[in-house]
């Protein structure tokens, strides 16, 4: 069996630090961080005509765990929410940094921070950890949903890059969910239709593991630009 480029580069130690490029121009530690994200629980973000939506799988495996104790959708500011896939302890640190940055912006400028500005600040920190010796990259992708002049969904990558989407997914079933969204997403979806699409997509990819108790979600309306956590009853109606 012939060794692959990746295994040969591992043998030569190119994956021992995030600041060493392999001969073909790759940062292997960063690529490992991306693989960690693909092992995380699935999260979906959707822009609809009423606002912006996040729904995620909390991945409750143990029967004795209280589902309410697991938080997967976080309020960053009144008008911004976030969820993550990958190492959630990494996500917690970054989201807390985002919460502080949002509050500092309000105090300094007497106005809410834009979602894109906040995303750039978090991505700058992520990028920094791809070129610092003695540290590893953040093994998490964070999805930000926010309201400004328009609703936005951004996904941040372990490399420090980000993209804006109308609808997207992160986590273990990212590819399957994106296929569903590409076929069924429409620009003029209502809040109820957006929730129904997201829950339906999770139900199809999770199969027998699907349960409303495993879902966490939030909606930010275009009208009042306020973070509202989705109730179990609303999620149950959509399944």
Image: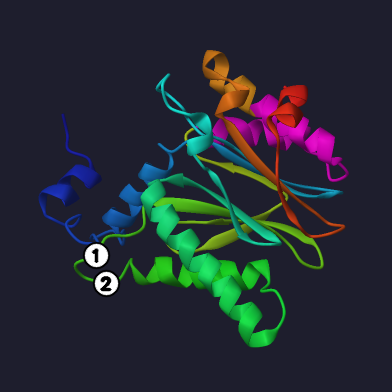
Give how far across and how far down residue 223 sits, in percent. Answer: 87, 57
Q: Nearer the viewer, residue 20 or 147?
A: 147
Quadrant for the N terminus, please.
Answer: top left
- Helix, strand or loop status at disc 1: loop
Q: Which residue is mark 1?
A: 135
* Left/right of residue 149 with respect to residue 181 in the rendered view: right
**Quick one: label 2, few (<14), some, or many (20+) residues within 10 Å?**
few
Residue drawn 22% across the image and 40% down it:
4
Q: Quadrant of residue 208?
A: top right
Residue drawn 19% across the image and 43% down it:
7
Residue drawn 43% across the image and 38% down it:
40
Q: Which of the labelled discs sits on residue 64, or is there none?
A: none
* Left/right of residue 3 with respect to residue 32 in the rendered view: left
Q: Which residue is mark 2?
A: 132
Residues shaded magenta: 173-201
Main SS class of the magenta portion in the image: helix
Furthest-bottom residue in this view: 108
Decide whether residue 187 is among the magenta residues.
Answer: yes
- Helix, strand or loop status at disc 2: loop
Q: Nearer the viewer, residue 64 or 219?
A: 64
Quadrant for the C terminus, please.
Answer: top right
Give how far across and how far down residue 109 sits, in percent. Answer: 67, 86
Residue drawn 43% across the image and 27% down it:
65
Decide whether residue 158 is among the magenta residues.
Answer: no
Furthest-left residue in this view: 12
């Amino acid at each position: 069996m012939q060794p692959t480029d990746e295994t040969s580069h591992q043998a030569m130690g190119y994956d021992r630090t995030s600041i060493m490029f392999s001969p073909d121009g790759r940062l292997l530690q960063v690529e490992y961080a991306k693989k960690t994200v693909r092992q995380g629980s699935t999260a979906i973000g959707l822009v609809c005509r009423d606002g912006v939506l996040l729904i995620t799988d909390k991945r409750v495996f143990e029967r004795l765990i209280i589902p309410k104790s697991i938080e997967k959708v976080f309020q960053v500011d009144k008008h911004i929410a976030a969820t993550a896939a990958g190492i959630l302890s990494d996500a917690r640190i970054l989201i807390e940094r985002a919460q502080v940055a949002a509050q500092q912006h309000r105090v300094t400028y007497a106005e809410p921070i834009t979602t894109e500005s906040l995303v750039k600040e978090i991505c700058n920190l992520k990028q920094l950890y791809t070129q610092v010796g003695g540290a590893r990259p953040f093994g998490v992708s964070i999805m930000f949903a926010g309201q400004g002049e328009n609703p936005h969904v951004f996904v941040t990558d372990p490399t420090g890059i980000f993209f804006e989407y109308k609808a997207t997914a992160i986590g273990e079933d990212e590819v399957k969910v994106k296929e569903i969204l590409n076929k069924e997403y429409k620009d003029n979806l209502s809040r109820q239709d957006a929730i129904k699409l997201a829950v339906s997509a999770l139900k199809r990819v999770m199969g027998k593991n699907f349960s409303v108790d495993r879902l966490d979600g939030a909606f930010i309306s275009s009208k009042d630009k306020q973070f509202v956590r989705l109730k179990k009853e609303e999620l149950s109606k959509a399944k």
